[in-house]
Amino acid sequence: MPTCTFCGKNIAPGTGKMYVYISGKIDYFCKNSCEKNLLKLKRKPSKIKWTQEYRNEHKKSS
């Protein structure tokens, strides 16, 4: 079961999106907001409060 590249949540089978770069790197997204934040808006997950990376960096509980 893959995890979302942006927010860190597990993605249920049959849902989500897989984005493949020309270089071969693969990103998985659980919802459209995660995809837009990373690809279109170029936001870093460590600066968005609802992502797992932010919680780990700032020692917040999930």
Image (cartoon, rainbow, N blue to C red):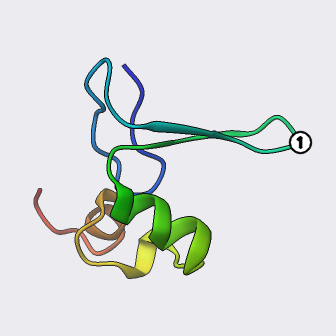
Determine crowd level at label 1: few under 14, some 14-19, many 20+ residues with C-alpha closer than 10 A.
few
Answer above or below: position of 25 versus 36.
above
Pick whichever, 62 or 24, lies toward us.
Answer: 24
Residue 47 locus on image (x, y percent): 41, 81
Residue depicted at 39% across the width and 35% down the height: 3
Q: Which quarter of the rendered picture does the C terminus lie within?
A: bottom left
Residue 49 locus on image (x, y percent): 25, 77
Residue depicted at 28% across the width and 43% down the height: 9
Amino acid type, residue under disc 1 in the picture: Ser
Residue depicted at 82% across the width and 34% down the height: 24
What kind of element bears circle 1? loop
Residue under numbered circle 1: 23
Q: Report the number of numbered marks.
A: 1
Query: Which of the 4 image quarters holds residue 33?
Result: bottom left
Q: Is residue 43 left or right of residue 6?
A: right
Residue 18 locus on image (x, y percent): 55, 36
Direction right: furthest residue: 23
Q: Which quarter of the rendered picture does the N terminus lie within?
A: top left
Query: Which of the 4 image quarters holds residue 58?
Result: bottom left
